[in-house]
Image: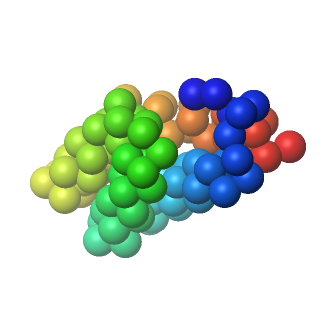
């Protein structure tokens, strides 16, 4: 990921995707599986448009996991938290 050369619109989309992931995590923890799944799938769409295919694939797997089990995996939680920290640095 090269944030330095990214346009403001690209940065905004990355921040938006990571906010959706964070919101999905919070909603899943509160038991709103449908809302959390929807937010993860929205994040996947944005990530794919930004050529973040690896992260999009991980979030797609988490959305599928969430639909099946009602929970985000511990690995998915770690990924969301780590990418959110990077995004906070980006938006400073």
Question: In the rendered image, which quarter contains the N terminus?
Answer: top right
Above or below residue 79? Residue 11 is below
Q: Nearer the viewer, residue 24 or 60?
A: 60
Q: Residue at x 42, y 39 (%)?
A: 51
Give the image location of residue 50, x and y in percent. 48, 45
How is this picture coloured? rainbow
Left or right: where does residue 92 sit relative to residue 15?
right
Check the image and name the residue furthest to the left. Answer: 68
Tell me which corner region of the image, top left, top right, bottom left or bottom right, holds residue 35: bottom left
Give the image location of residue 44, x and y in percent. 36, 52
Above or below residue 49? Residue 4 is above
Q: Residue at x 70, y 47 (%)?
A: 7
Question: In the rendered image, which quarter contains the C terminus?
Answer: top right
Q: How many marks?
A: 0
Check the image and name the residue furthest to the right. Answer: 92
Left or right: where does residue 74 sit relative to residue 82?
left
Give the image location of residue 22, x and y in percent. 54, 53
Q: Residue at x 52, y 54 (%)?
A: 17
Q: Nearer the viewer, residue 85 or 44?
A: 44
Q: Residue at x 38, y 47 (%)?
A: 48
- Residue 78 visible, this orientation: yes
Give the image location of residue 56, x and y in percent. 36, 42
- Residue 76 visible, this orientation: no
Q: Nearer the viewer, residue 11 or 83?
A: 11
Above or below residue 10? Residue 3 is above
Above or below residue 68? Residue 74 is above
């Amino acid at each position: 990921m090269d944030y330095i050369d990214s346009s403001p619109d690209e940065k905004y989309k990355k921040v938006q995707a990571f906010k959706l992931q964070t919101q999905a995590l919070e909603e899943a923890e509160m038991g709103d599986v449908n809302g959390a799944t929807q937010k993860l799938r929205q994040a996947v769409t944005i990530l794919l448009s930004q050529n973040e295919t690896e992260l999009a694939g991980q979030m797609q797997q988490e959305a599928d996991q969430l639909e099946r089990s009602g929970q985000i995996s511990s690995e998915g939680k770690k990924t969301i938290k780590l990418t959110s920290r990077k995004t906070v640095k980006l938006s400073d």
